Image (cartoon, rainbow, N blue to C red):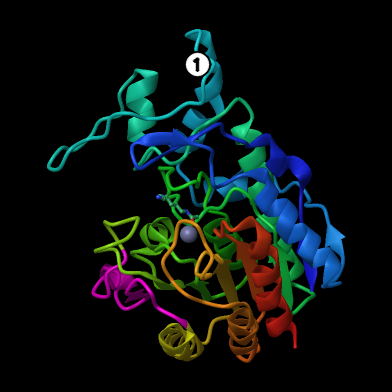
Amino acid sequence: MKTVYSEDHRLHHASAELNDGEMMPCFEKPARADQVLAEVERAELGPIIPPDDHGEAPIRRVHTDQYIDFFQSAWSRWADLGRSNDMLPLAWPPRRVQPRCPQDIDGQLGYFSFDAGAPITATTWQAVYSGAQVALSAAALLQHERQAFALCRPPGHHAGADYMGGYCYLNNAAIAAQSLLDQGARRVALLDVDYHHGNGTQDIFWTRPDVLVASIHADPRVEYPFFAGHADERGVGTGEGFNHNYPLPPGTAWAAWSQALQDALRVVAGYAPDALVISLGVDTFSGDPISQFRLQGDDYLRMGEQIGALRLPTLFVMEGGYAVAEIGLNAVNVLRGAAT
Ligand code: Q9C
Ligand code: ZN
């Protein structure tokens, strides 16, 4: 299996995130991608290739022009005010408000985010632009290959069409899924196995029948992102029935997790998609510092085998996973399992 990778992810390294009431070093840091890349090399998974530049158009197929335009100019506007710390939002519209986009940079930061978990630095746009190109380039490989791995960083599944949050800025998996449709696929299935609900992905495809979204994740009643991911969220209008959530309790291990996977894969197979995109988060791991599931090393091989057994053209897009010592091995185990 080929891996698409760009060093440009290093251009995003924020200084701190808010946890338990204090600013702490970011869990989402460049070393994560280094660790995954090192395991791809060690396991001799296949060639590691740089992305092609597909430009902004395929990004703007998923994200709004207003959001992208804001993002591209955000840092210079911030710096013009004499500010040099990472950009972080601090105000959001409350319930029952139909927000209008403010003019002020702090107001706009709140308008284009849903939490304070996605700091913008001077070079964040360049990093996430390259990350999207990694996903697009790996998606293009599916023209000739059965599977491909987009080693994206930062992750993407919490980002919606016009908002960032949860370490995510551009929804790499959604951008890849849309590009597969634009290249001729009639239906694409997107299965999100990250510990956290892929709220951005769900939102992007909520009204659409051409992308089936399934997500296995911690129950939002007790876990981030809290406000989406319940089992009764199934899409609306023509999208009704094309969104499937599998919320699971904290402490879930492979026995129960794999039951949800089995059902999700049955739903995916029933949809008969032309391609499958996996949002590959490995923060389901027992040792993950911010998560409460209990998956073990070998479980990731089984996960990959079961995904691979569908025999669909499959794109794996890296999402979360934060125990730096093991995320590489766990991610590569999924890929190795799928490639067998
Ligand atoms: N006490 C992804 O996995 N909150 N994002 C962490 C820890 C944010 C996770 C709180 C978690 C975001 C892509
Ligand atoms: Zn996650």
Vertical order, 282 against 246 (above or below): above
Residue 330: name its quadrant: bottom right
The answer to whether residue 137 is seen in the rendering is no
Residue at image point 35% right, 41% down: 115
View extreme (left): residue:
96
- Residue 21 locus on image (x, y percent): 33, 37
- Residue 4 locus on image (x, y percent): 76, 59
**In the rendered structure, which segment of residues is drawn in magenta?**
229-253
**Quarter of the figure with the N terminus:** bottom right
Residue at image point 86% right, 72% down: 44
User: Is 223 displayed left or right of 312 in the figure?
Assistant: left
User: Is 202 displayed left or right of 331 in the figure?
Assistant: left
- Residue 234 locus on image (x, y percent): 29, 73
Q: Is residue 239 magenta?
A: yes
Q: Main secondary structure of the magenta part?
A: loop
Disc 1: which residue: 77
Would the CB of label 1 be found within 8 Å of ligand 1? no
Q: Residue 214 versus residue 318: which sits nearer the camera?
A: 318
Residue at image point 62% right, 63% down: 317
**Quarter of the figure with the C terminus:** bottom right
The answer to whether residue 152 is seen in the rendering is yes
Q: Is residue 102 magenta?
A: no
Vertical order, 227 against 63 (above or below): below
